[in-house]
Amino acid sequence: MNDPGRQYVLFRAGSEEYGLPISRVSSIIRFETITPVPRAPRGVLGVIDLRGRVIPIVDLGRKLFGTKFEALSRSRIIVTEGSDGPVGLAVDGASEVATFLPEDLMAAPTGAVAPDIADAFEAVVHLGTRLIILLDLDRILPKAEYELSGTELPEVES
């Protein structure tokens, strides 16, 4: 039986391209106004209300490169379903969905990246002339890094 491969949502953060398993992505939305949260952890831009759910938004570029996110017309929020609930990733653009076979995947480099994020790189794959880094969502965004520091948002009665 042939392995049909796994599908990944491809996106840009800075000048690099990354992929997340499509099974972990619930939606991709245009970048919208984010409500800042006092005392939010470094890298958390704030929260949005998405169809009645309050979603923390993480600056993925800051996590990966230490650079601050700047919203542009092509910027997107990738709403993911982490093991501890939804979290949005502010990215510079989302481009496509691609399928990769197990034999397409190459081991992620270990010496070329900071030790604190090396485990988050699942694999690297070529797509034409492009090199895509596939990410492990739970390792790139441990809950402690986007949890809103005990800040509880009030329930709104309707």
Image (cartoon, grey):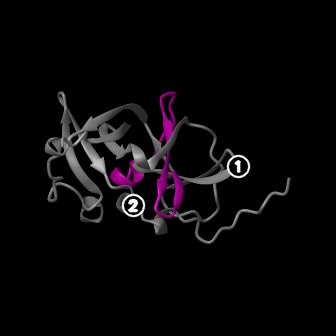
Left or right of 47: which side holds 63? left
Q: Amino acid at mark 1?
A: Gly
Element type where label 1 sits in the image: loop
Count of numbered labels shown in the rendering: 2
On the image, numbered disc 2 is attached to which residue? 138
Q: Which is nearer the eye, 129 or 149? A: 129
Is residue 78 at all visible to an observer of this figure? Answer: no
Left or right of 136: which side holds 152? right
Q: For the magenta stretch, what is the residue range?
A: 61-87
Could you tell me which residue is drawn at 55 percent across and 36 percent down? Answer: 29
In the rendered structure, does residue 131 fall within the stretch colored magenta?
A: no
On the image, numbered disc 1 is attached to which residue? 52
Q: Quadrant of the N terminus?
A: top left
Mark 2: give few (<14), some (14-19) or many (20+) Cα within 10 Å.
Answer: few
Q: Residue furthest front?
A: 1
Could you tell me which residue is drawn at 54 percent across and 55 percent down? Answer: 86
CB contact under 8 Å: marks 1 and 2: no
Q: Amino acid at mark 2?
A: Asp
Left or right of 18: which side holds 109? left
Q: How far from the left and from the top, in percent, is residue 28?
A: 51, 37
